[in-house]
Image: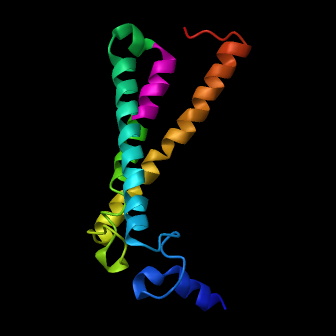
Amino acid sequence: SQNCVLAQSMNFICGCEGPGYAGANTHTKQAVLAWLPRSMAILSTLGSSFILYDTTKTIQKRRRLLNHMLSTLSVFDVMGSIAYAFTTLPTPESDYIYGSRGNDATCTAQGFFIQIGTVACFLNVSLAVNYLLSIKHGWKDE
């Protein structure tokens, strides 16, 4: 039944047999599920920070539209990546998720910053349009 499937998917709470939280039915798998996004988020933060530094280090670079878009994208990506780096820490302890130490307010704050980070997707589309106009149609940044 549907209730049985729900109970099995939440077995990390009750300790019964089932696939576990996102398939993580052992402590080790739960730890990997919490730490792998942290390491990727840290790499994303470092990469975006370098792009931000590189696109704003000279006046000539700051004047280019492409660099404006890249630096704005990087700012939003850093915010979202830092929020992702916390993974399960802001989750309320009452949710019984590996590494949860937060409360409703910290969980909401993390969700807010993850959503802010999705702005980078829209900026990525703007970059693609910019490249289309520049490469295919010969548009110049003046």
Residue 52 drawn at (x, y percent): 37, 26
Residue at image coords 47%, 83%: 11
Q: Is residue 124 left or right of residue 138?
A: left
Residue 15 drawn at (x, y percent): 42, 86
Q: Is residue 52 left or right of residue 119?
A: left
Q: Nearer the viewer, residue 61 or 49?
A: 49
Residue 24 highlighted magenta (yes or no): no
Compared with 61, 11 (above or below) is below
Residue 25 drawn at (x, y percent): 47, 74
The magenta-colored residue range is: 64-74
Q: Nearer the viewer, residue 119 or 89?
A: 89
Residue at image coords 33%, 59%: 109
Quarter holding the N terminus? Answer: bottom right
Question: Image quarter for residue 43?
Answer: top left
Rendered image coloring scheme: rainbow
Label the magenta part by its dominant secondary structure: helix
Compared with 102, 71 (above or below) is above
Residue 117 drawn at (x, y percent): 44, 46
Q: Residue furthest right?
A: 136
Q: Is residue 138 left or right of residue 123?
A: right
Compared with 115, 136 (above or below) is above
Q: From where the camera sits, is residue 29 visible?
A: yes
Q: Nearer the viewer, residue 17 or 41?
A: 17
